[in-house]
Image: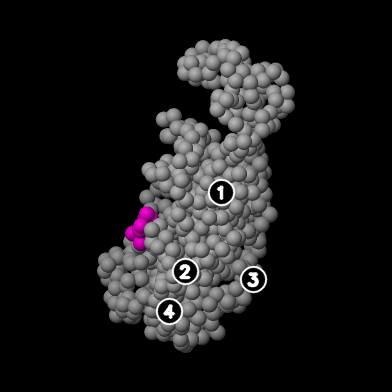
C-alpha cells in the first residue's frame, strides 16, 4: 500500500466519508439507504447452510424491531467477541431479504466506547486486493490514523510559502491533512481537499515550468529566419489545395519559434485527416531553405512508406532528395541513403526507429518531426536530438486529441499548436449503432458499398475465442465473412502475425487487391486507404472512446461518404450507452477526448510524462479538477517569472520542497 512511515500513513487519504453522527431506528430503514448505524443488543445467534454456503446470523434488536446481522465464511471469533445482551453500535448497508432487513459483515463497536460527538464523518480507505486477503481492512487503517492524529502534538510542517497560502486563502497543511481524514463537517472536507489538490498540482506545474525554463537557458536553437525558394515554390506551385485557416496559423506559430533563436519544442494536435502531414512538410521546407536537413520518424514501416509516397507526390519534380530508412532498407540501398545523409545530399529522411541508430549521421539536421509521438519514449527522441551539435527543432504530432487539462500536465513543457479544421471537401463520417442480432442488415450494407467499388474494415477485440469473455473474435469472424462473401477477397491482420506478413496484408488492402480487411486494433494507426468507406467495429462496447475515434478515423479519407458501424450486445450499462451515443452524435475529436477523460480518468501519468519529473496524484483528478490545474499553473508561472534564479526568500520553500519531491521520483530521462 506504499505505507512505510507515519508520513506515508498521514498521506494515505480516504476515498470517501460517511456521516456517522446519527443513530437510525430499525423501523426507519429502507432498501435504498447507503449506510446506517443502529444501537441495540444481540438477542441470539443462528447458523444456516453447510460447507461454503454456511453463514452465521445474529438477531439484533434496538427495541423498535429486529435486524439480522449476517457473516458468510463463518469464523469462530465472531461469537467469541460479541456477547448476547451487551449494547453495541452496528454500522453497515441494509438490504431487505426474506421479509426482514439484514446487514452483511457489519462494523460493530462497543456502545459505551463510542460517542456520536467524536464520530462525525467516518473515513473509508481503499484497500488493495492483496492487502485485503491478508486481513487489512478500512477500519484497521482508520484506527491507525486516528491514533496517529491523537498522538501527533506537533503541527504537520507547511509545504507552501506563506505568500501563496495567504493569497489563495488556504488552510494550513496541518489543518488540511487532519480534515482529510477526520473533517469537522462537509465544508471543512471541501476546503482541505482544495488545499491539497492545489498544492499537488502546483508542484507538478512548477516542475514542468522549471524544466522548460532550464532547457531554454541551456539549449539554443538553430536560427531559421529565411522563407526561401523551396517553401515559396511549393506554396505557390505545388500545393494541392488551399490551406485551412488553422493550418496557416500553426505554420506561423512554428516559424516564429524557428526564427526566434531558441529550440522549437512543439506539440501539433490535429484530428484524423486534418492535414498535419502537409503542415510538417511545409515546416521541413522552411528548415531546408535555411541550409538544414529534416527527418520524420513514424512508428511503423507501413506508415513511414506512406509518408514517403505522400511527400514525393506533393513535391513532384522539385529538386529535393527524399529517402526512406527502415529495417527493410538493407545493403547497397541503405549505404546510399547513409552516404547521402552524411554529405547533406538527402534533404528529407523518412524512417522508423532505424533513424536513431548510431551509424545514421546527418551533415546538419535542423528539424525532427515525430509522428504519433505517444509510440516513442523520451530517450528514443533524445537520441535524435543529439544528432547535431546544436539540437534540432522538434515537432511532435498526434492524431489523438488531448484534453487541455491533460495537455497542461503531461505535455506542459511543450508549446501546443492545434489544427481544429478539416480540409474542404471532407464529408463527416456517419456513425451508426447496431445490435449484433442484425447481422443480415449489416452484411447487406457491406455488399452495397463494395458493389460501388469501396472497401471495408471489420475490427474485432480478440484474435481467438476466449473462455473468459463472451466476445466476437477475429478468427471466427474471418471464417463467417468468407462464407457470407465467397466471391470477395478478404484478408486478415492481427498482432500475433510477423511484421512482414502483417505489412504485406495491409499493403494488399491499400492497393485495392482485397475488398475486406478483418483486423484487431493493429490498424488503429498507420494505414491510409482513401477508398475504404466502411468501418465495422464488433463488440464496440469493449473499446474506449479515444480508441473508437481512432478506428473510425481509418475511413472518411476520400471524397465519398463514409460510415462507421458500432456493433454491440443488446444489454449495455448506462455508461456504455452514453459512450456509444457520444460517438454517434459527434466527429469532434476534442469533444470526444474530454468525454473520454471524464469516463476513464487520466490513466497512468507515468506512461506518457514528457518532462524531467512527475509526481503521483494522490488527491487531484485531472478529469474533474481542470480549473484547479489552471490556477496551479498560473501560480507556478508567477513563481518562475518572479524568481528565475531561485534566490527570492519568500519562494525558497517552493524550491526546497520541489527538490525534496524530485528525489523520490523516477528519472524520466531514462525511459525508452
**Does label 1 or label 2 sit earlier along the sequence?**
1
Give the spatial CA distance, label 2 vs label 4.
Answer: 30 Å
| Disc ID at residue 262 | 4
Does residue 587 sit above or below 54 in this rendering?
A: below
Q: Quick one: 192 or 271, which is closer to the camera?
A: 192
Query: Comparing marks 1 and 2, which lies closer to the viewer?
Result: 2
Q: Quick one: 55 or 370, which is closer to the camera?
A: 55
x, y percent for residue 380: 36, 63
Does residue 230 sit above or below 647 in this rendering?
A: below
Residue tagged by mark 1? Answer: 600
Q: Tell me what residue is drawn at x 66 percent, y 33 percent.
A: 22
Q: Tell me what residue is drawn at x 52 percent, y 74 percent.
A: 279
**Does label 4 or label 1 sit earlier along the sequence?**
4
**Does label 2 or label 4 sit earlier along the sequence?**
4
Q: The magenta stretch spans which residues?
A: 663-670
Q: Tell me what residue is drawn at x 65 percent, y 63 percent.
A: 427
Residue tagged by mark 3? Answer: 424
Residue tagged by mark 2? Answer: 650
**Does label 3 or label 1 sit earlier along the sequence?**
3
Give the spatial CA distance, label 1 vs label 2.
Answer: 39 Å
**Does label 3 or label 4 sit earlier along the sequence?**
4
Give the spatial CA distance, label 4 vs label 1.
Answer: 37 Å
Amino acid at each position: 500500500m506504499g505505507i512505510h512511515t507515519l508520513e506515508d500513513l498521514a498521506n494515505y487519504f480516504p476515498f470517501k466519508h460517511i456521516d456517522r453522527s446519527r443513530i437510525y431506528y430499525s423501523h426507519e430503514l429502507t432498501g435504498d439507504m447507503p449506510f446506517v448505524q443502529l444501537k441495540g443488543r444481540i438477542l441470539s445467534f443462528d447458523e444456516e447452510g453447510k460447507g461454503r454456503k454456511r453463514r452465521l446470523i445474529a438477531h439484533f434488536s434496538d427495541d423498535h424491531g429486529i435486524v439480522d446481522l449476517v457473516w458468510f465464511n463463518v469464523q469462530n471469533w465472531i461469537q467469541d467477541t460479541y456477547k448476547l445482551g451487551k449494547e453495541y453500535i452496528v454500522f453497515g448497508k441494509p438490504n431487505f431479504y426474506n421479509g426482514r432487513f439484514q446487514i452483511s459483515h457489519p462494523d460493530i463497536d462497543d456502545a459505551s466506547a463510542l460517542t456520536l460527538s467524536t464520530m462525525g464523518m467516518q473515513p473509508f480507505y481503499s484497500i488493495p486486493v492483496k492487502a485485503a486477503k491478508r486481513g487489512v481492512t478500512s477500519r484497521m487503517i482508520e484506527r491507525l490514523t486516528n491514533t496517529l492524529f491523537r498522538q501527533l502534538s506537533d503541527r504537520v510542517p507547511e509545504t507552501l510559502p506563506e505568500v501563496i497560502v495567504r493569497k489563495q486563502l488556504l488552510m494550513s497543511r496541518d489543518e488540511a491533512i487532519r480534515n482529510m481524514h477526520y473533517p469537522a463537517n462537509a465544508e471543512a472536507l471541501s476546503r482541505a481537499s482544495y488545499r491539497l489538490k492545489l498544492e499537488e498540482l502546483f508542484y507538478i506545474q512548477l516542475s514542468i515550468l522549471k524544466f522548460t525554463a532550464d532547457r531554454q537557458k541551456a539549449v539554443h536553437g538553430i536560427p531559421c529566419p529565411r522563407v526561401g525558394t523551396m517553401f515559396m515554390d511549393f506554396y505557390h506551385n505545388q500545393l494541392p489545395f488551399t490551406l485551412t485557416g488553422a493550418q496557416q496559423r500553426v505554420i506561423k506559430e512554428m516559424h516564429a519559434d524557428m526564427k526566434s533563436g531558441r529550440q522549437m519544442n512543439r506539440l501539433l494536435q490535429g484530428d484524423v485527416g486534418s492535414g498535419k502531414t502537409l503542415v510538417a512538410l511545409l515546416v521541413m521546407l522552411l528548415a531546408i531553405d535555411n541550409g538544414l536537413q529534416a527527418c520524420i520518424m513514424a512508428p511503423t514501416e507501413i506508415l513511414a512508406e506512406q509518408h514517403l509516397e505522400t511527400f514525393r507526390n506533393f513535391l513532384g519534380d522539385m529538386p529535393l532528395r527524399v529517402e526512406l530508412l527502415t529495417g527493410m532498407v538493407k545493403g547497397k540501398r541503405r549505404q546510399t541513403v547513409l552516404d547521402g545523409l552524411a554529405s547533406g545530399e538527402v534533404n528529407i529522411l523518412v524512417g522508423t526507429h532505424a533513424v536513431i541508430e548510431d551509424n545514421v549521421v546527418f551533415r546538419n539536421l535542423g528539424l525532427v518531426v515525430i509522428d504519433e509521438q505517444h509510440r516513442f519514449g523520451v530517450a528514443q527522441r533524445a537520441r535524435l536530438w543529439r544528432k547535431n551539435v546544436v539540437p534540432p527543432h522538434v515537432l511532435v504530432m498526434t492524431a489523438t486529441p488531448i484534453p487541455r487539462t491533460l495537455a497542461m500536465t503531461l505535455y506542459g513543457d511543450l508549446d501546443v499548436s492545434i489544427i481544429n479544421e478539416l480540409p474542404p471537401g471532407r464529408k463527416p463520417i456517419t456513425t451508426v449503432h447496431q445490435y449484433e442480432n442484425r447481422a443480415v442488415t449489416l452484411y447487406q450494407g457491406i455488399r452495397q458499398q463494395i458493389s460501388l467499388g469501396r472497401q471495408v474494415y471489420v475490427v474485432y477485440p480478440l484474435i481467438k475465442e476466449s473462455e473468459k469473455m463472451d466476445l466476437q473474435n477475429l478468427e471466427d469472424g474471418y471464417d463467417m465473412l468468407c462464407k457470407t462473401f465467397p466471391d470477395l477477397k478478404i484478408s486478415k491482420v492481427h498482432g500475433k502475425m510477423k511484421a512482414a506478413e502483417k505489412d504485406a496484408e495491409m499493403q494488399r488492402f491499400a492497393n485495392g487487391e482485397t475488398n475486406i480487411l478483418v483486423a484487431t486494433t493493429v490498424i488503429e494507426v498507420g494505414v491510409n486507404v482513401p477508398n475504404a468507406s466502411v468501418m465495422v467495429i464488433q463488440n464496440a462496447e469493449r473499446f474506449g472512446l479515444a480508441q473508437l475515434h481512432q478506428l473510425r478515423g481509418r475511413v472518411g479519407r476520400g471524397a465519398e461518404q463514409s460510415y462507421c458501424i458500432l456493433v454491440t450486445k443488446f444489454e449495455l450499462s448506462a455508461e456504455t450507452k452514453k459512450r456509444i451515443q457520444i460517438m454517434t452524435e459527434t466527429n469532434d475529436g476534442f469533444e470526444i477526448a474530454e468525454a473520454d477523460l471524464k469516463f476513464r480518468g487520466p490513466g497512468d501519468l507515468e506512461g506518457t510524462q514528457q518532462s524531467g519529473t512527475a509526481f503521483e496524484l494522490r488527491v487531484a483528478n485531472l478529469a474533474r479538477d481542470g480549473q484547479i490545474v489552471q490556477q496551479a499553473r498560473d501560480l507556478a508561472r508567477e513563481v518562475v517569472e518572479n524568481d528565475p534564479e531561485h534566490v527570492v526568500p519568500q519562494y525558497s520553500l517552493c524550491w526546497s520542497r520541489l527538490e525534496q519531491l524530485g528525489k523520490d521520483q523516477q528519472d524520466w530521462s531514462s525511459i525508452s
